[in-house]
Image (cartoon, rainbow, N blue to C red):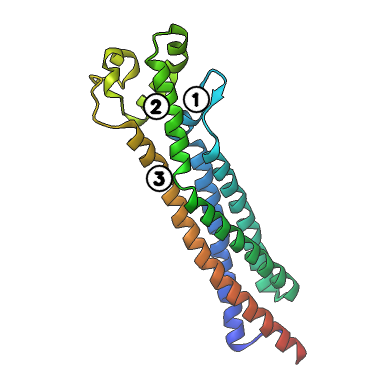
Amino acid sequence: MGVEGCTKCIKYMLFVFNFIFWLAGGVILGVALWLRHEPTTSNLLIQQIGDKQVPATFYIGIYIIIAVGAVMMFVGFLGCYGAIQESQCLLGTFFACLVILFACEVAAGIWGFVNREQVSKEIKQFYDEAYEQARSSKKEEYEKARPVIKVFHESLQCCKADLRNLADSLCPSGTSGILSEDCHRKIDELFQSKLHLVGIAAAVVAVIMIIEMIFSMVLCCGIRIYSVY
């Protein structure tokens, strides 16, 4: 016997929220893939000086988001199917998956808040090392650092003022080498804006998760009551 009354309304509301959750998973997956392959960020994060590569902390976070997006799409589909079929087993599995996802999101959010400046700090340290080598009188060190510094300056449209004697090769085209845009600030702006985007998406998904957990439990209890009769 199918559910009736308010429980039936909850069934369809849960289906709608699960469909939104499935779409949200697709959006998060798409945004994560965009962050992974966005030209400005990618150009900076593939740089290396000799054997030293740019720290991969940012990419590790992006790969986690990609995995979360894929899991959300699977869980959303599971919830939609469980709601339509009025299956206690599927709804119970769906609820358990939501709890695990929610716990992981809270843990990731806490970690991200504590380490929110770590990505920018690592990139700035790498840039500073390249910058010091670019100022070196040793030709070998200069040749290693030059392409890295040039990519940073061209991508971020910034330049160190005391590189004016090397402006033709290291500063963005058309500048005098006394560019007012500070490279550290530009690095902060680039990565902080992306982290804020991820944070907003995570907050929206968390709200949807809480609503779905409530609806799934109410529907599961309603199905159990109606199955008795």
Residue 225 location, x and y as percent? 71, 88
Residue 48 location, x and y as percent? 51, 23
Side of 33 where 143 appears, left or right: left
Task: Give the secondary structure at mark 3.
Answer: helix
Residue at (72%, 68%) from the top-left corner? 93
The correct choice, above or below, for 56 with respect to 69 in the image is above
Label 1 sits on residue: 47
Image quadrant where one finds the C terminus: bottom right
How far is mark 2 from mark 3, CA to CA? 17 Å
Residue at (39%, 22%) from the top-left corner? 131
Side of 193 where 28 appears, left or right: right
How far is mark 1 from mark 2, CA to CA? 9 Å
Label 3 sits on residue: 192
Image quadrant where one finds the N terminus: bottom right
Badges 1 and 2: C-beta atoms under 8 Å apart?
yes
Label 2 sits on residue: 152
